[in-house]
């Protein structure tokens, strides 16, 4: 069967970005990014299990500046996904749906994730 | 007149036969990951250095071994559930969708088992 490629609705690009939609997209994006980070965690654990030389070899990659840069990104993703995840769990019990409340909670998550990730980055990663 | 039997009406599963289960376990794993994730972040921050002997000593501590294995199980499970939804939303061709979901699922199981194996090998292996 020939299917005509008709335009699909809705087009994401016709909507004005709002705190609700942007944070929702960001929740997905950070989630998928964190999923990719599991491979790094696995590589770290396997290298330790492989003995001291394997760990030293892996450290060339895992301790590099490129990976430190990645850790900063994962750090933000972690705190954002954690904060917004708690926001979702609060919604799941039926709290915070009133007009304005979801905006306030959204900005709280943004501020929390920025403060937490910048402090953690400065104190631990860098 | 509805052709749905009274039992199926009460169970309320519809033709998909599932759905609420996925939603529920995603929430449960999310709740479990709050303390586990915070523990891991705090534990990493508390490490004096990242030398081989330090990280081995950290993982060998029974509390840390147990929490790491719990974190690995919960993390890969939660990740599997999340990535699966993303695939379901954006991959439209039905064959490719099924193949991708199976591949995602197998990868997560492989990662979980390999990770747990690594922690056990470090924790139960000969002392450094």
Image (tube, rainbow, N blue to C red):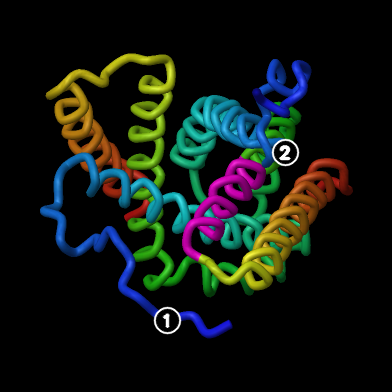
Residue at left offset 56%, top offset 68%:
A59
Q: Quadrant of the C terminus of chain A?
A: bottom left
What percent of the width, then of the height, locates residue B74? 65, 37
Residue B16 vertical position relative to residue B27 in the rendered view, above or below: below
Circle on res. A4: 1
What percent of the width, then of the height, locates residue B8? 74, 23
Q: Residue furthest front?
A: B1
Q: CA distance from mark 2 to mark 1?
A: 50 Å
Q: Quadrant of the N terminus of chain A?
A: bottom right
Residue at left offset 40%, top offset 35%:
A82
Residues shaded magenta: B75-90
Residue B81 included in the magenta stretch of the image: yes
Residue A125 vertical position relative to residue A111 in the rendered view, above or below: below
Circle on res. B69: 2
Give the secondary structure at mark 1. Answer: loop
The mark closer to the camera, 2 or 1, is: 1
């Amino acid at each position: 069967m020939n299917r005509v490629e008709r335009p699909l609705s809705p087009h994401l690009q016709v909507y004005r970005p709002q705190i609700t939609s942007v944070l929702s997209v960001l929740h997905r994006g950070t989630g998928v990014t964190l999923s990719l980070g599991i491979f790094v965690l696995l590589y770290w654990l396997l290298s330790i299990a492989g003995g001291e030389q394997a760990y030293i070899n892996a450290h060339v990659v895992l301790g590099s500046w490129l990976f430190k840069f990645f850790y900063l990104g994962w750090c933000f993703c972690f705190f954002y996904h954690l904060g917004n995840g708690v926001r979702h769990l609060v919604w799941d019990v039926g709290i915070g749906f009133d007009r304005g409340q979801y905006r306030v909670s959204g900005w709280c998550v943004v501020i929390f994730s920025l403060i937490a990730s910048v402090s953690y980055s400065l104190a631990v990663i860098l | 007149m509805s052709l749905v039997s009274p039992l199926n009406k009460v169970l309320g599963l519809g033709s998909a036969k599932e759905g609420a289960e996925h939603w529920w376990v995603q929430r449960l794993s999310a709740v479990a990951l709050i303390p586990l994730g915070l523990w891991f972040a705090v534990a990493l921050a508390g490490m004096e250095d990242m030398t081989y002997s330090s990280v081995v000593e950290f993982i060998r501590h029974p509390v840390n071994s147990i929490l790491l294995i719990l974190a690995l199980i919960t993390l890969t499970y939660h990740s599997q559930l999340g990535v699966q939804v993303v695939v379901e939303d954006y991959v439209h061709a039905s064959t490719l969708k099924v193949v991708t979901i199976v591949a995602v699922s197998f990868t997560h199981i492989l990662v979980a088992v390999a990770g747990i194996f690594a922690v056990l090998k470090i924790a139960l292996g000969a002392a450094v």
